[in-house]
Image (spheres, rainbow, N blue to C red):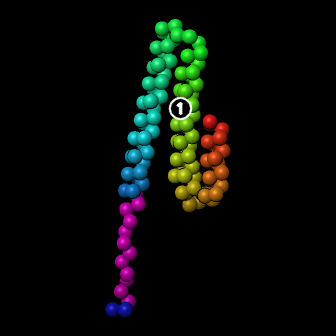
Amino acid sequence: MGAEKRREPKLKVVGLVQATEARERSKLLNRVKRIRGQITAVERALTEDDDCPDVLMQLAAARGAINSLMAEVLEDHIRLHVVAQGKGAIEPEIAEDLIDLVRAYLK
């Protein structure tokens, strides 16, 4: 019996990734809904002829929310599709530098 193969426990990595992706997707969709609300507020402000500084403040908030959403989607893409890929993958340290650059640029 010395030649028995050891059975390695199988990890359900795909299930874990899918669950994580579902949570992330839900989080991103909630952010999109908040952005939609901000844009609706801008539309209402323009319709009601609100003061320009108020409209600009709402636009700046919406732009910031969109930039944050873009940064998060890019970060997820870098982590899941650029670093995680075998051939042609980049080092995690380089990926972190790239993510920091994206965050700084989209602030």
Residue found 66% across the figure and 51% down from its top: 97
Q: Is residue 15 left or right of residue 106?
A: left
Q: Is residue 20 left or right of residue 89?
A: left
Which of these two is toward me, 87 or 92?
Answer: 92
Which type of secondary structure does the marked residue at label 1 adopt?
helix
| Residue 9 percent location from the top left of the image | 36, 72
Report the amino acid beneath label 1.
Ala
Q: Is residue 2 left or right of residue 101?
A: left
Which of these two is toward me, 79 or 101?
Answer: 101
Q: Main secondary structure of the magenta part?
A: loop
| Residue 68 percent location from the top left of the image | 55, 36
Residue 2 on the magenta segment: no
Q: Is residue 88 visible?
A: no
From this view, report whether residue 63 is shown above or below residue 86.
Answer: above
Quadrant of residue 86 within the rendered picture: bottom right
Image quadrant containing the C terminus = top right
Q: Residue tagged by mark 1?
A: 65
Residue found 52% across the figure and 52% down from its top: 80
Quadrant of residue 54 within the rendered picture: top right
State which region is magenta: 3-14
| Residue 8 percent location from the top left of the image | 38, 75
Residue found 45% across the figure and 32% down from its top: 32
From this view, report whether residue 7 is shown above or below residue 15.
Answer: below
